[in-house]
Structures are given as C-alpha cells and as structure tokens.
Image (cartoon, rainbow, N blue to C red):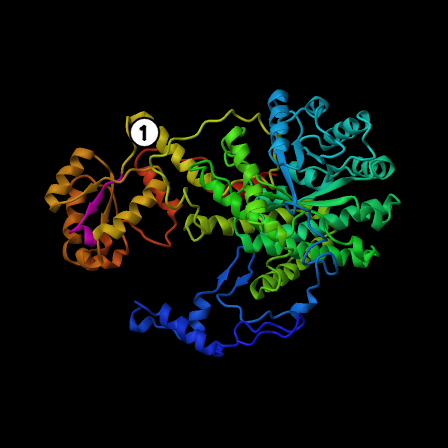
Amino acid sequence: MSVPAGPDEALPLAADFPERTHEEWQALAAAVVNRGRAQDRQVDGAQAEESLTTTTVDGLRVKPLYARYAGEPIDAIGLPGAMPFTRGSGAREPGTGWDVRALHEDPDAEVTTAAAALDLERGVTSLWFEVGEHAVGAGDLAAILADVDLADVPIAVSSASDPTAAADALAAVWRDRGVADRAAGTLGHDPLAHAARHDAEPEDGPMIEAVRSCAADLPGVRAIAVDTRPYHDAGAGDVDELGLAIATGIAHLRTLADAGIAAPEAFAQIEFRVAVGADQFLSIARLRALRRLWARVGEVAGVPEGARGAWQHAVTSRRMISRDDPWVNLLRGTAACFAAAAGGAEAVTVLPFDAAIGLPDALSRRTARNTQLLLAQESNVGRVADPAGGSWYVEELTDDLARAGWAWMQRIEAAGGVAAALRSGLVGDRIAATAAERDARIATRELPLTGVSSFPDAAEAPLTRRPRPASPPSSRRLPPRRDAEPFEALRDAARAGAERDGGPPAVPLLCLGARRDFGARETFTTSVLAAGGLAAPQLMGTPEEQAARLRELGSPVAVLCSSASRYAEDGAGLARAARDAGVRTLYVAGRAAELGDAADAVDGEVRAGADVLALLRAIQSELGLDAPAGLDRAASTAQEGDRS
C-alpha cells in the first residue's frame, strides 16, 4: 500500500483490495439468505437485499449495505461549529467533552441535598431539578443549593406541574446569592410542552418575561428549553420528535418576535431537551439532523451564522426503561449515552436504572453518573467531534431524518402551528399511529425487549424502592407510556395468581422424542411463557404417561413441543391424549401444518413472529388469571381519544 506523501493526500486504505460490484455483493447475500430455504422459496440478489432492509416505525428504510452517501458530497456536511452545524455546534467541553448533568426528583430535601453534593463531588458538572409537589419543592431549592458554588455549577429546572414557579424559584436563588451575572443554566420554559402534557392552552407570558429577565441580569442563563419528552414518552418516533422540536422552536421565535424580541436574541435563549434511546444510530442521526434544521431556521430568521447551532440537552429515554429485570437498563442507558455523546449533545443526563420502580437509591445514582464518566474519561468518546461523521450510513440516515422531520414540521405549520396541531388532534393522532406500530412490533418481538419479552428472568427477585409521589394528571391525548408495560402487566397477573394458588401458574410442555427432537422449541417456548410469568414444566414419555401427568396437574392449557418429523409421527396421538386428559386449549410449538391431517387438533401456534402478547393474554385467561390492565394500549388510547 502506498503511503501518502503529505497531509493533504488521501490515505488509500482499501487500495490493495480488488473492487467489487454491488451485484457481486447481492449474489453473496442471496447465498446466505437462501441457505436452508426450500427450492421454491429461493431469492435472487435484489430480493435478498430487500429482505435484509428494515423499516423504522417512522417509515425510514434502513438498508443492509451503504456503498456511498447518496446525498450531498461528504465534504459539504461542514465542520463542527459551522453551517450547516450537522457536525456540532462548536468546540467540545475540555475533559469530558460534554456537561454531565444529574437529574434530582426526590421530594425529601435532605436526601436531595446530600445526593446533589455527592454527584458534584464524584464528577457531575451540572444539576437538574424536577420541581413541584411530585418532586423537589420550589421552596426547598435555596436550602438544597446552599453549599453549591452557583458561579461554577450550572443549574437547570423543569416542572410537569408548575414550570413558572420552578423558574422563578431558581432565578430568586441566583439573585439572592448575588451570582446572577455569573450564573449558568436553564429556567426550562416551554409552554407548548406543558400544554401537550395537560391538554391545555399554552401561556406564553411567563416565557416572554423570563427571556427579558435573563437578558437583563442573567446573561449566562437560557430561559427556554424546547422539550420533546412529552411526545417521546407518549410513543413518538424520531421523525415525530424532530419535526415537533423545530416547529416548537419556530413557534417560540414568533411569540418572542411579537413581543419585540429579535431572532438573534431569542436564539440565544433556547436550548433543546430531547430524549435519546438505545437505537444508537437513530439517536445520533436525530441530534445531527436537529442541528441542521435549526441552523436553517436561523438562516431564514437572519441569525448570525456563528449563533445558529442548536444547544442540546440529551436525556436517556424514560419510555425504554423496564421495571422487570431492571439491570438491563444499564445497557440501554449506556447505549443511549454513547449516542448522545457521539451525536454531539452539549449536556447529557442518564436516568437511573431503577427509575421505573421508584425513587433512585445511591447505587442507581452512582451507576447513572459513572456511565457518563466511563464513556468520557476511559472510552474517550468526548475527545472526537462528530465521530460518526462521514459514515455513509449515518450521513444518509441523518439526511432522511432531516427531510422527513422538515416535512412533518411543514404539516404542523400548515395546520396553524404546534398549539393548533395539538388542539386539532393532528399531533396526537400521528403519535398514536407511530406508537401503535411500535406496539405491534413489540407484541411480536420484532422489537424485542431484553429481560422482558426476550430472555426474561423467571427467578427474578423484584427490587424495591421508595415510591414516587403521585405525578400530575397527564394528557388524555398524549398519555405517557413505557414500552415494557404490557409485559409487566402480564407478570403482575401471574404473580397475583401465584399468591392465590400457592405456586406459579404453569403451562405443561408435552415433549415428544429425545432432547435433540424437542430441545430448541422447548427453550423457545419456555422463554415465551416466562415473559408472561408462566412456568413451563416438561412432560415426557408415552402419550398415556403424559396424559396421566396432565390429569394430576389439572392444567386446561398445554403445548405440544417437538420437531416437525416427530409431530408427523406421534403428534396426533399425543394431541388426542391431551384432550382426553382435560386440556381445553392446546398449542403447538412451531406450525400447525407440521401435524399434517391433525393440524386442526390444536388451537394455536407458539412460533417466531406470532403475537406473543395476544398469545399470553389468551393463555392467562384460560388459567383464570385477571386480565392485565393496559395490555391493549392501542384500543384503550383510541377509546380515550373518543371520549375526549
């Protein structure tokens, strides 16, 4: 391989490898896809590539191979701190690379004071308080921050109940401490997000006054945090959130312009508070696309070029956090934190892994803090600006998101803006459709939830935490949700049944043949049943022996479990024996067609691609377990929307 003569000459990393065509790659892909397929189901190269292409819940196509970036030339994406700001809003923070921001929600002022002090001692660089009767008291902020160097530590507030009171309390602390001219942080005003949370009309007055107040004597403070979390928590997709973020920012610019505040001054008062999920590439691309679109808004509004970069506070998704097997949340949080850092967020908050259980304890706060510190200081993620930049995949995904997000923003604008789109149901209907698509994929495990729908821990000892105070009433049109809730409801119903009956509810597996015959499907079926909190005892032996055992167990439900060849030989006889033993509902692991003429002897299939939630719900109903509330989210959301 030739070595470049100077710094301006490209390094030909692949020069010694022969060039391959796209058609050659397709042929290789087809060979893999066709492996094990019947002759009449063989595919060609183009069909193989299509079968490996996935579509996000937003409708974006993700290809299996990116041979080049199909948009503008790579050198047109710019540099960090320059138009179009795709690659970052400017130089990264020295040391960590971003602001490590810890969220505090505990209403016990003493606990919060101690936790905040420990966070700052152990590497956190700014503090964020959720304020209200459900969280940190507005009147407690002064005492909590009494020993914090407010001239050095940025402070942010938010409130799901009274954002004006939260912002006023923080501003008063800065002024009373005499650090107003040196303070940094965010007052968190976003009347549109607050309206979305509560199905209310936005009140812009406090936001306008806060912007004026910051300009007067809080020069280092941002008054506004465009907050997309209400939409994310309700099930919005990446395109939904992106379009709403830009549309909300535009709405605030108009409101401030009507109040006599020019766009350059308004731009300096706005940050974006956005969720990041475990799909790291989508999260990276969305952060990059948001900067690109906001820079375009700034360009049209006449904002000086150097001030057009969007300042982003990325928060790991609350929707992705599971209550069951919460330790997996450490992995989800790490992936999301990496995405936030690689995507160029200026501040990052990792939610504690036990956030779905109750108020965090010292361990979960420590792991949330150290997730960021390990990525920054040991993995050195923050030392490189836009590490994903130039990747054909990331650049095309960024471009797809930007174009789709801009189109959605234009629809919102055509409907009269965010407030009108919320009022008319345009936003709620779109997010409900996205959430329904995601729910369907979760139900079939096309989108698996590790530790919940896939690889559940049947012997899990649930964690206990101090309960959170009741949250403020939430929107009927945009109710918050977590992806794992339907499976958690199934587990709750199973636990209630176990307490009632003195043991876990069980669905016997009627195993045919030797382990090599039924092993793979037994493992698969046991995992499926465990996702619903159901035990899966294995019965083996002759049909008569298994029937005798079924009578002892008295289970009304059972699953035939073996290979297709054994089903063809002995499946019909075992199915008859199970029915004679009192089994009312009989399933087969695999395809019913594998039973041949006895296919109608079973009532359903346990297989990959099946609606696991519907299957488990039906089985629990047969076992006499209480129907888990909230399982059919799409139907309940639609009914709630009709009532509203």
Which residue lies at the image location 36% right of the left edge and 28% below the top edge? 496
Q: Position of residue 341 (x, y in %)?
A: 61, 49
| Residue 508 on the magenta span | yes
| In-front residue for pair 604/75 | 75
Q: Is residue 642 visible?
A: no
User: Does residue 387 appear in the picture of this structure?
Assistant: yes
Q: Report the quarter where the C terminus lies.
A: top right
> From the viewer's perspective, is residue 55 above or below residue 169?
below
Q: Which residue is mark 1?
A: 498
Q: Position of residue 574 (x, y in %)?
A: 16, 48
Which residue is found at the position 72% from the left and 33% from the top? 163
Residue 82 vertical placement versus 539 (above, below):
below
Quarter holding residue 301:
bottom right
Q: Position of residue 348 (x, y in %)?
A: 63, 43
Q: Amino acid at mark 1?
A: Ala
Provide the secondary structure element on which disc 1 rests. helix
| Residue 85 in magenta stretch | no
Q: Residue at x 41, y 50 (%)?
A: 445
Q: Is residue 214 left or right of residue 140?
A: right
Region of the chain picked out in magenta, as a range: 507-517
- Outermost residue on the right side: it is 260
Above or below, comparing residue 230 to residue 244 in the picture: above
Q: Is residue 580 left or right of residue 175?
A: left
